[in-house]
Each structure stands twice: as C-alpha cells, then as structure tokens.
Amino acid sequence: MAIREIRVVPDPVLRTPCDEIKEITPAVRRLVDDLLQTVDDPGRAGLSANQIGVNLRAFSYNIDGKIGYLLNPVIEEKSGEQYGDEGCLSVPGLWYKTRRADYARVRGIDLDGKEIVLEGHGLFGRMLQHECDHLDGHVYLDRLEKEERREAMRYMRNHH
C-alpha cells in the first residue's frame, strides 16, 4: 500500500488507452489499494490507474467524503449538460471551464468481480467522465477549444 507519484502531461502513459482487467490478481488488489490511498487527499476528486503509471482500466474517486473505486468502467449513459471548471492532477496548476454531460452512469466491477453501477450529476458525473477519458488515453485539455488547449500545453511545457 502506497501513495504513488502522479504522472503529468506530457508523460506518454497518459496518452495510452488502458487494458481491460482480465482477472483479479494480487497486483490488481495492490493497485486498488494504491489508488484509494493516493486519492485520499483534500482536493482530489478522482484518479485513474494510468495517472500512477499503470496501464489498466481502474480508477478511484473521492467526492463528498465518499471514497471508492471501479474496475473496467464503461460509460452507459450521459445526459444534460454542465459547463464548469475542471482540473486534473496530471495537469497541475491549471483549471479550465469544460463542457460535460451533467449526468453520467458507468458500469464496471469490484474486486470480487461483482457488477457495480456508479451514477451521478454535477461533480460526480463530471468525475466519472473525466476518469473514463483518462482510461481511453485522453486528458481533459483535449476537450478545450483550440486556443485554450494551446495555451495550456504551452504552460505545461514551461512549468514542468
């Protein structure tokens, strides 16, 4: 169990789609422990496995005092719209208004292989979409308008 270092843009692991977890091994259990420990810090809403350098489809979350995780998440439904500030541990120091669905429902499994559905509006919905994007090899900057995205990438090159 460890708090892991967070990878930041332009680390190529953040651009690599993650692999589905085929079986729950001791390594996967350790990964979940590390994800839960690493996200358990004020200001951290969610953390995907590739943000700590592991190329597997898993994320943890920490919203309104609830901490949890999901393996092999798939977005099943999105609806509505929200446009608000979004940040990312892999893009430290930057916040940009980002358009997302207001509501998201995601299905995956837990460490016992049981099916889990996470769903929510607002911040929880935003987090679900943000973490699933990570697992597909995207960071939220990809969703910005071109000018903002260029500005953000320039900032990251000069400050990290």
Image (cartoon, rainbow, N blue to C red):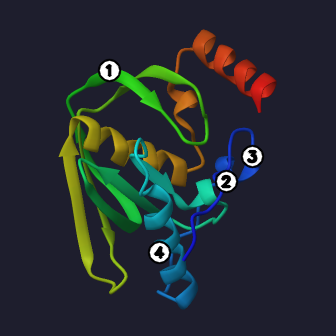
State the separation of the CA atoms marked 2 and 1. Answer: 26 Å
Q: Nearer the viewer, mark 1 or mark 4?
A: 4
Q: Nearer the viewer, mark 3 or mark 2?
A: 3
- The residue carrying mark 4 is 33
> Amino acid type of disc 1?
Tyr
The circle drawn on residue 83 is 1
Q: Position of residue 49 (x, y in %)?
A: 55, 61
Q: Residue at x 47, y 73 (%)?
A: 32
**N-terminal of the two: label 4 or label 2?**
2
User: Which mark lies nearer to you, 4 or 2?
Assistant: 4
Q: Residues within 10 Å of mark 2 (few under 14, many from 20)?
A: some
> Does label 1 or label 4 sit earlier along the sequence?
4
Question: Which residue is denoted by mark 2 in the rendering?
Answer: 16
To which residue does mark 3 refer? 11
Looking at the image, tell me whether mark 3 or mark 2 is earlier in sequence order.
Answer: 3
Q: Is residue 89 above or below residue 111?
A: above
For marks 4 and 2, give the CA distance. Answer: 22 Å
Residue type (three-letter) at the residue carrying disc 2:
Thr
SS class of the residue under badge 4? helix
